[in-house]
Amino acid sequence: MAGISRADVAHVAHLARLSLTDEEIELFSSQLAKVLDHFEDVAALDTAGVAATAHPLPLRNVLRADEAGPCLDREEILAAAPAVEDGRFRVPRILGEAP
Amino acid sequence: MSPASTPSALEVAAAVRSGERTAVDVLESHLAVVARREPELHAFNLVTEEQARADAAAVDAAVAAGRDPGPLAGVPVALKDNLCTRGVATTCSSLILEGWRPPYDATVVRRVRAAGGVVIGKTNLDEFAMGSSTENSAFGPTRNPHDPSRVPGGSSGGSAAAVASGMATLGLGSDTGGSIRQPAALCGVVGVKPTYGLVSRYGLVAFASSLDQIGPFAGTVKDAALLLEVISGHDPADSTSIAAPPAPLLDAITTGVEGLRIGVIGELMDGVEPAAAAAVRAAAGALEDAGAKLGEASVPAAIYGLSAYYLIAPAEASSNLARYDGVRYGLRVTEGVEDVTSMFAATRAAGFGAEVKRRIMLGTYALSAGYYDAYYGKAQRVRTLIIRDFEEAYREFDVLISPTTPGPAFELGAKTADPLAMYMNDVCTIPSNLAGAPAMSVPWWTPGQDLPLGVQVLAPALGESVMFRVAAAVEAAAP
């Protein structure tokens, strides 16, 4: 599993919504391979029957009473956005065709 | 310059509360240190002079009116720049958040202010807390106050340098894999990673949510206890916050270590520089002289901590950092953008630095179809093994000790080209994050050496009281 190809890196970059330059793809291919090599010690460990730990606390769902309380100010939040329109965040075209 | 040569937070607060000294006077003396040291060290992304002057004046007004400003009265506090401050830029040392002003204060910031603390500024960090040297900052590196050719450690290098240089009396950082303890060790100050859930993370910009924890930097163990007491406690705004009331620490410190069973973690003594191991041996000897029972402890799975961490933390980071998409705040790149997907990709490419991209790539890969079980799933099982090994060790010992780092501060640029070499800095600190348990670094200056090292004191979850008792004894014995 140690090998990670340029195509793998390009695919992962797309999944992560990162546009990488050719130089970055080249650099990350070799650097990620080296880091993944280091994981081989873990991959080789026998962990059969060992439960996974996702979180260090024995917490389950934490709920609060369903009561309305103060929340962040809408105008203040919208003022921080790069583009807004009619009280909403404005983004570039989402679907394949222009509206 | 040792921080012990400046008044402690306890001394400052006592003087301000009694009216012997004004908070404004305290602040001005620290701003004078900032003016002298900051141009060289670059510990701060922003010094909030005007707000600090107003806050200090308010503390003095309270004293004059006969009201108690609180246990941090007039104490200058530096905040890592990944802690949200209402209306004040919070950058995470990233271009993607440049210009963003949070609409709320982190819970710890509110608690510091409510206790009379004076926020002096926002400190530099490795971008989004990813790094061990504070070199991965979009705004340039921070330098070590004891030798400016060297790094202060990271990722909370700015807070560590601010406290070590006397620019601030106390600092707050965040520790995901050692980001408080490692810079504390490299800068010769005390740094604490509390039990996961002891301190509210509301308003801490998330890196790896199952590991992140906020904690104090201080010049002394007592000052660290003071700040931790102020920031601890349940917060309904953080669902991972522990509901139990925090144990008092300052009272516990004076108890001593007589009869405590203390183990030196063998696995973390192998592979560190001889000076780092020697410092721990010397501290262990001093603890034995003080009445503790010393032994060799074993946490066998700790050696897999580094690998497990560098799967789990990037995996969680790749998910947490998905929120930086140019839609709601921060940077948006519009040039050459055809649709929303290309806007996301172009914005993130321009806004994130190399290490953040590397971790997002690593995490996305570890979580992607076909690799999830082999990498992320495996790492989560190793996490269980580490927790079990600690439980086993704590049947025999009350507290464990180890080096905080494999060696002292290294030169700027020494490890930037080799990510794995940089990651190795965290080998002694990572196991506590994976276990959710507390650990702290106490400075140790070996006679004849120009740079400090750290002795790490580890305890089981919610074992802060006994951890601070041992830390105080290590501090008292330090050369």
Image (spheres, coloured by chain):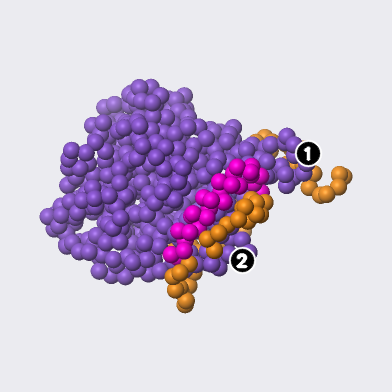
Which chain does the purple colour mark?
Answer: B
Is A22 within the magenta?
A: yes
- The rendered magenta stretch, by its main secondary structure, is classed as helix
Secondary element at image label 1: loop
Please report the bounds of the magenta region as a residue range: A16-42
Depth check: give the residue in front, A34 or B230.
A34
Q: Give the x, y percent position of residue B128.
A: 51, 44
Residue B36 is tagged as: none
Which chain does the orange colour mark?
Answer: A
Quadrant the N terminus of chain B occupies: top left
Q: Chain of mark 2?
A: B
User: What residue did someone put label 2 on?
Assistant: B370
Up/down of B314 relative to B129, above or below: below
Up/down of B398 relative to A12, above or below: below
Can I make out residue B245 in this image? no
Depth check: give the residue in front, B325 or B103.
B325
Q: Give the x, y percent position of residue B328.
A: 67, 42
Up/down of B270 relative to A90, above or below: below
Instruction: Tell me the mark number nearer the camera, choosing from 1 and 2.
Output: 2
Crowding at mark 1 (Cα within 10 Å: few <14, some 14-19, many 20+): few
* Residue at the (57%, 57%) spot, across then down: A4
Q: Give the x, y percent position of residue B279.
A: 22, 49
